[in-house]
Amino acid sequence: MGAVIQAFRQAGGRARRAALLAALALIAPLAHAQSSAGAAPASGATSWTDWSTWTSWWPWRDKGPPPPTGVESPHYGDSLFYFFQGRYFTSVTQLMASQQFRRMAPHDDEAEILRGGLFLSYGLHREAGEVFAKLIERGATPPVRDRAWFYLAKIRYQRGLLPEAEEALARIEKPLPGDLEEDRVLLQAYVLMGRAKYAEAARVLDALAKGPGASSYARYNLGVALIRGGDPARGSALLDELGKMPASTEEFRSLRDKANVALGFAALKDNRPVDANAYLERVRLSGMLSNKALLGFGWARAQANAPTHRARHEAMNLALVPWTELATRDPGDAAVLEARLAVPYAYAELGSYAQSLDLYQDAIHAFEGESARLDESITAIRSGRLLDGLIASNPGEEMGWFWNVAELPDAQALPHGGHLAQVLATHEFQEAFKNYRDLLFVARNLQQWRDSLGVLRDMLANRRQAYAERLPQVQEKERALHLAEAAQRRDDLAAELERVEREVDAAAFATPRERELQARLDRVRDALERSGTDPELAPARERYRRAAGALLWQQNDQFAVRLWNAKKGMQQLQGNLAQSQQRSAAIAAAQRDEPARLDRFAARIDELAARIEAMIPRVAALSREQQAAVQEIAVAELLRQKERLLDYGTQARFAVAQTHDRANQAKDGNRAPAR
């Protein structure tokens, strides 16, 4: 957890979207290697090799992967269960605890990759790099190694570590499977363009764009790289193709708008208003780039080559159409603010000076009012109401890199909600706010552990009390067993059983009924012996002989069965005695070891309590620092808007003075040229 806290001190977690892909997209090839080595999947379960089918389309798409099957380790399955629920903090803690006790076999490599991916999701790219490096040292297969370097390069790029990202990409030895290879080429191009190596980026993208099924993103980035790398003709042709392409999804419609806007403003820069007009006409009126397109479209109309005064007049009238529409939109957009100045400029060019002056004054008042509203929003942000409102409106159990702001706070959090859109649109604010939210989760987690340690102390005290109360009772019951005497009796019985078997003493196993008959026969025998040789007792002597023989025959007939039962009973007796002796030894060991064991638990609780008590103020301080940083990011965005408003207000005031001069000159018949 200390590493997590330190990560919040560093430049924040821009790795959240793609980080865990390094975990799951690499698990399948590892399993595939195991399967190839002879590991067969469980009967009736889908093999881990089937999971590799989604690794080629999940990483850069909006779809989520199906959960895996064929997990052999229940502890690894437990971590995956929390992972697929989106409870990534619980997943990584469960995973690391199970790894500590070596419970992950046969998924040790998959678990290690999942841990590295989870580290990446929290911005711990150095720790994740160490995980991947150790995995490679252990002899991971080339596909696994290449995927590891790809995702590490991606996370480094998103954190702005361009040289490190380029170094990781250079370690990839073979083409990646499926769409991942296209993603790798695009990432390499992004890194090169980020380092202003546009010609190299164009060469990298050229082969990809010419291949079958090349994506629109590849062609768009190739067009941008060509334009910036010194080949504007070919780059513009590529963007023009994208600007005309049919688009069935919002994603590609936005990309088409982006290409047309880029072409339109490039044409305006090159003083080609007719071409700019053609490009910007393709942009949708309700898209994300519609405001910028309307502004450029108006300037394309205004800059049209008009040889006569009448043509110039018509061009300005045409420019007023998009500018007037744009001026009515949200003033938080810079294009709208420019339109508030462009409209009175057009009226001045048309000679409607009174209307132009009124519109300039309206724009100045609008800029001043918007600036005052921005001041109110800045005050609300610095008071903490914005972040509190965002947290309250977007609750969540655990921190996670898929989390985004879904609900906006009420008016008490930010009096002018329109300003929030500009703030939330910045990637810097989103990531900084996620870090702040994650710190709040860590603080809650530490507080829960502090409370849990109190419960553990109570449990330990109850355990000590129960031990102290039950030990005398157990010892008393043990003494009542007289184990030493029982062992001596067992030895005597064993010796007697051995004698009976050796001497074949069938009478030793006589039943109570047989012993009673034997006693009666003994009395009859004694009586016959006292009577001497009386011939009248001859029949009695014969009956005695027959009865004694029958009894002896019965005992000898049952001797083998009775001997087996006696041995069986002796074995059971020996087992019970051995079990009693083991329990007695366990009681003695517990009496000797349990107090020390309980003391170790108490020491461990005290150690954890000390660590938690030391971390709570650190996390609280980091939370305050992060809160201040997030608020300043939001304030900085609003201050930029204030500066823009101030600049536009200054332009409007100069335009008012210039329009007054032109109006006065027009009255004298000396209309000055527009500047």
Image (cartoon, grey):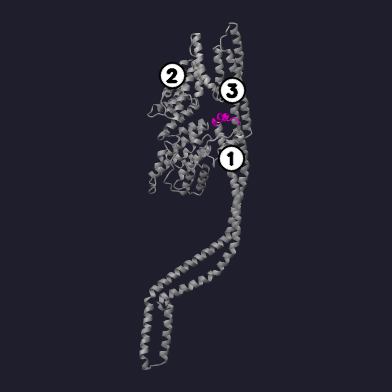
Query: In which quadrant of the rendered image does the N terminus lie?
Result: top right
Residue 420 forms part of the magenta stretch: yes
Q: Nearer the viewer, residue 40 or 489?
A: 40
Q: Nearer the viewer, residue 56 or 324?
A: 324
- Residue under pointer 1: 440
Number of marks in the rendered image: 3
C-alpha distance separating marks 3 and 1:
34 Å
Q: Could you tell me the amino acid type at mark 1? A: Leu
Q: Could you tell me the amino acid type at mark 2? A: Ala
Quadrant of residue 252 in the image?
top left
Percent across and percent down for residue 255 are 45, 27
Q: Could you tell me the amino acid type at mark 3? A: Arg
Q: Earlier in the sequence, mark 3 or mark 1?
A: 1
Quadrant of residue 555 in the image?
bottom left
Q: Give the number of the disc on residue 233.
A: 2
Picture residue at 58% right of the left edge, 65% below the top: 473
Secondary-structure class at tag 1:
helix
Q: Write down the region rendered in magenta.
A: 415-427
Comparing labels 2 and 1, the label whose residue is closer to the camera: 1
Q: Give the number of the disc on residue 35.
A: none
C-alpha distance separating marks 2 and 3:
34 Å
Q: Is residue 193 rendered to the left or right of residue 464?
A: left
Q: Give the number of the disc on residue 644.
A: 3
- Residues packed near mark 2 inside 10 Å, few (<14), some (14 to 19) or many (20 plus): few
Q: Nearer the viewer, residue 311 or 427?
A: 311
C-alpha distance separating marks 2 and 1:
52 Å
Q: Is residue 622 above or below residue 594?
A: above
- Residues packed near mark 3 inside 10 Å, few (<14), some (14 to 19) or many (20 plus): some
Q: Is residue 307 above or below residue 92?
A: above
- Residues packed near mark 1 inside 10 Å, few (<14), some (14 to 19) or many (20 plus): many
